[in-house]
Each structure stands twice: as structure tokens, then as C-alpha cells.
Image (cartoon, rainbow, N blue to C red):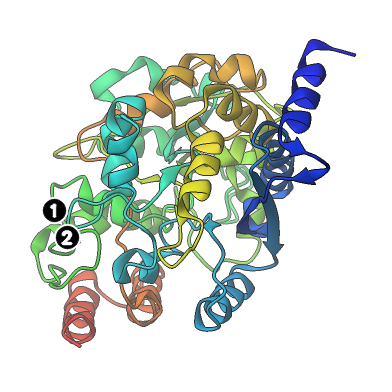
């Protein structure tokens, strides 16, 4: 018998007196399958270890299906007075719960245990996990910074320098110039066999932020729209100009999904993050690398998303839930195992330089993920109280902009008027 298992057996024996086991506190961790099977595997594996080393606590992992099913079940559990103790919403999915206080403020727990979360992670992570009142709504699971992906083979054929070697010269003008050289329409039929830049209609708000402009008065629970500012047109003109020139794909074009970066027909992507590597590029179908996000007129900020673990404010097992959350989020060995299983970028600063060791299939310039995270202007997307209503206004009009059906200024004015009405409710 190994020393480890001898120790665990001793713990169990100590906790059993005259054949009567100590009462256990049950912690329910409710997560959803959208995080992927590796996430579930991690939670189940860690729960077994945690339960064996915490004889007074038993963690039970529950999983739901789609995001809509997850929200529906969570709502029923809350209404029925039987909430889970821990969840793992990402900011967009958990927006209403961040705003209305469904998630416990973790600040007192962090202070009690002497944990400096800012030092353990980064300012960008803290900006995502902080509420408008200075609270902390979750502990980080990973980070998803959006960076430049580029096909080295296509850049070599076009005689272009790699984005990672350009430093601050990797800017909007250089993207456009590179995309022109990377786009190839060999048979002249108007549909390139090889494109310059991928899905510029996605994460379009990044380009507005790179002009130094914010679309709202605050990131979490905005109350005022700034869509009527000229910087909106300046930001959106960057992706639109490339679509109109035919060097970037347009949304809703037949066959566009077969042109995505990981199929090898696209020179670069400015809208992907670590998840794309594990999902599509793990086997390295062609030579590629990454670089920090392109620089706009004011900054090189990008979008960052932080998946998180939350404690439910109506939980009756908060202290036990907190111990479990610390174990899966802040324990270095646990977090290293999470990164190894999922391929996601570590949120703990001390694991950043071990990222490639844990995931050998990463590109050589993997530290660009963390450089982008630290860039001035990097932020998460807006967390709206009624995101479905806001998106129902914005998304169709943005799509019309990028298909050339409506001028930017006209669409921005309509969005400003309609979203302002929603925010005023």
C-alpha cells in the first residue's frame, strides 16, 4: 500500500468512532456540458481526491445539457429553495446572476484566508470578476484572451513578415496590407481560393474599443449607451473595409464555414483564442503561430473571457463550498491538472510559463496569450441585465452593416435609440 493511500485510510479511521462516521456536509457543484467533456472529467477527478482528503465534506458533481437547459434547471432550483452550492457560469451566461446578487461576494472569504487574488492572477482577470460595488463574484477557472493566429506557410509564400516579429508595427494598416497579399483568386471567378483574414464580423466590438471608445458607461449592467459616438463608425470601418474589398469573408456567405482558419485556407484570424487550439489545431494540420492582438489607433487591447466558479448566496453550505472552490481554482496542482486536461489557458500567474509544458501541442509563441491579457484596453464584453433584448436589437443591424445593406452611421443611430430605451427600463 502506498504512503498516500495509507494516509487516506488513516483519515477515514480517525473520522470513525465506535462504528459511527462523522456527519458530512454535502456540496453540490452544478455545471453544464457546454464546457466540454474534459471539464467534467476534471471536476469528477478532483471531487474524488477532495472527498478522500476532506472526510467531513462530500462534493457531488451534477451536469446539465445545453446552456438553456442549465439556466432552466438552475432557475427551478433557486425557486424551489434547493439551490446548488457551486456553479460555473461564464460571464455572458451568468450576467443576470452577477448583477442581482445571486452569486455570493467572495471578498470576505478571500480576506479571511489571506488570499490576494489580484496577485495570484492578473489585473485583467480581476476586472472581469469584480462587481460594480467592488465585490468578487467568482473564482477563475481559465482565461480566454483573443489573439492573432497566422498561417506561417501562407505568410512565407506571400513573402510577409510574421506578426509576432512586428511588435507595434502589427497594426490595422499592416493587417489590411497583409490580407491583400494573402488573398488569392487564382481562377478569377470572384471567389478566392485563399483568404486574407477570417471572420471579422465576430467580436466586432474589439475594434471600437481599440479607438479608445466604450459603447456604454460601464461594463457590468450598463445604464447609458454611447453608440451615437463617431468612434463607433471608425471602429466598424476597419472590418467592413476588408469585407467590401474582398480580402475578408462576409457573414452568411455560402460555404464560409469551410474557410475558417483551421482549414488552412485563411492567412490569419484575429478572433480566436486558446479554445481553438484544443478544438481544431491540436494535431497541427499546418504550420501556424500566434501573436498579440493587432494594434488599433489607440491601443492593442483585446477581448478576454474568464470562466469562473461561483458560490450561490442562498447556499446553506458556504464554508464547505468555499473549501471546494479554492481547491479547484487556486490550488496549483489542481489548476495544472485542469490545464493539462482541457488545454485552456491558466488563470494562475505562476502557471503561465508552464502552459506549453502542460500542453505540448501549443504554438511556440504561446506567451502571446498572456501578453494580450496584460495589454492596455483589454476587457471583457459587456454584461447586460437583459442581454437577450439588447442582442436582439444589435445583432441584426450589425449583420446588415457587414453585408452592406445599411450604412454604419444609420445602424448605430438605430441601435443607440433602441438600446437606450431598453437600458432605461
Q: How many marks?
A: 2
Residue shown at 35% from the left, 70% from the top:
398
Q: Position of residue 355 (x, y in %)?
A: 55, 20
- For the N terminus, give its image quadrant: top right
Q: Is residue 115 above or below residue 252?
A: above
Please state if 31 lies on the left or on the right of 135 as rendered: right
Q: Image height check: is 10 above or below 133?
A: above
Q: Is residue 285 left or right of residue 206?
A: right
Q: Is residue 203 above or below residue 119?
A: below
Q: Residue drawn at (58%, 55%), measured in percent from left and top?
A: 191
Q: Is residue 54 left or right of residue 379?
A: right
Query: 17 or 202: nearer the eye?
Result: 17
In the orientation shown, which residue stands out farthest toward the front? 18
Q: Which quadrant would residue 301 be assigned to in this image? A: top left
Image quarter for residue 397? Answer: bottom left
Q: Name the disc covering residue 170, or none.
A: none
Image coordinates for residue 343, horizontal then vertical, percent: 62, 32
Q: Quadrant of the C terminus?
A: bottom left
Do tag 2 and tag 1 residues touch (Cβ < 8 Å)? no
* 210 shown above or below 381: above
Provide the secondary structure element on which disc 2 rests.
loop
Q: Badge 1 local density, few (<14 within 10 Å), some, or many (20+)? A: many
Does label 2 or label 1 sit earlier along the sequence? Answer: 1
Q: Which residue is mark 1?
A: 213
- Residue at 20% in and 73% down: 412
Looking at the image, which is closer to me, 161 or 356? 356
From mark 2 to mark 1, how far is it between C-alphas? 12 Å
Can you identify the residue that label 2 sits on? Answer: 218
Of residues 248 and 136, the one nearer the viewer is 136
Q: Give the label, 2 or 1, closer to the camera.
A: 2
Q: Secondary structure at mark 1?
A: loop
Amino acid at each position: 500500500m502506498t504512503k498516500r493511500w495509507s494516509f487516506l485510510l488513516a483519515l477515514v479511521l480517525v473520522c470513525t468512532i465506535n462504528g459511527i462516521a462523522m456527519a458530512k456536509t454535502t456540496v453540490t457543484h452544478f455545471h453544464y456540458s457546454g464546457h466540454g467533456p474534459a471539464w467534467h472529467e476534471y471536476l469528477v477527478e478532483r471531487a474524488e481526491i477532495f472527498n478522500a482528503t476532506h472526510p467531513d465534506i462530500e462534493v457531488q458533481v451534477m451536469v446539465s445539457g445545453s446552456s438553456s437547459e442549465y439556466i432552466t434547471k438552475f432557475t427551478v432550483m433557486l425557486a424551489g429553495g434547493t439551490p446548488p452550492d457551486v456553479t460555473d457560469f461564464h460571464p455572458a451566461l451568468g450576467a443576470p446572476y452577477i448583477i442581482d446578487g445571486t452569486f455570493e461576494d467572495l471578498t470576505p472569504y478571500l480576506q479571511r484566508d489571506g488570499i490576494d487574488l489580484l496577485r495570484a492572477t492578473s489585473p485583467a482577470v480581476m476586472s472581469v470578476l469584480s462587481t460594480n460595488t467592488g465585490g468578487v463574484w467568482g473564482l477563475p477557472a481559465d482565461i480566454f484572451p483573443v489573439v492573432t493566429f497566422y498561417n506561417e506557410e501562407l505568410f512565407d509564400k506571400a513573402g510577409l513578415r510574421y506578426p509576432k516579429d512586428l511588435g507595434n508595427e502589427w497594426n490595422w494598416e499592416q493587417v489590411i496590407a497583409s490580407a491583400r497579399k494573402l488573398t488569392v483568386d487564382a481562377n478569377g471567378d470572384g471567389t478566392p481560393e485563399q483568404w486574407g483574414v477570417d471572420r471579422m464580423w465576430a467580436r466586432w466590438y474589439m475594434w471600437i474599443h481599440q479607438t479608445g471608445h466604450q459603447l456604454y458607461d460601464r461594463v457590468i449592467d450598463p445604464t447609458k449607451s454611447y453608440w451615437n459616438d463617431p468612434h463607433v463608425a471608425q471602429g466598424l470601418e476597419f472590418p467592413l473595409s476588408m469585407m467590401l474589398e474582398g480580402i475578408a469573408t462576409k457573414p452568411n456567405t455560402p460555404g464560409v464555414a469551410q474557410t475558417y482558419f483551421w482549414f488552412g485556407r485563411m492567412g490569419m484570424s484575429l478572433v480566436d483564442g486558446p479554445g481553438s487550439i484544443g478544438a481544431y489545431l491540436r494535431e497541427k494540420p499546418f504550420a501556424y503561430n500566434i501573436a498579440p492582438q493587432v494594434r488599433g489607433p489607440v491601443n492593442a487591447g483585446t477581448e478576454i473571457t474568464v470562466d469562473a466558479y461561483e458560490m450561490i448566496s442562498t447556499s446553506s453550505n458556504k464554508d464547505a463550498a468555499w473549501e471546494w472552490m479554492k481547491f479547484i481554482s487556486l490550488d496549483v496542482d489542481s489548476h495544472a491538472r485542469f490545464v493539462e486536461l482541457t488545454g485552456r489557458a491558466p488563470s494562475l500567474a505562476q502557471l503561465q510559463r508552464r502552459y506549453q509544458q502542460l500542453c505540448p501541442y501549443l504554438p511556440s509563441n504561446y506567451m502571446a496569450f498572456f501578453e494580450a491579457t496584460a495589454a492596455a484596453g483589454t476587457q471583457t464584453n459587456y454584461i447586460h441585465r437583459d442581454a437577450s433584448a439588447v442582442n436582439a436589437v444589435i445583432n441584426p443591424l450589425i449583420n446588415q452593416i457587414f453585408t452592406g445593406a445599411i450604412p454604419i452611421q444609420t445602424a448605430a443611430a438605430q441601435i443607440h435609440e433602441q438600446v437606450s430605451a431598453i437600458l432605461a427600463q
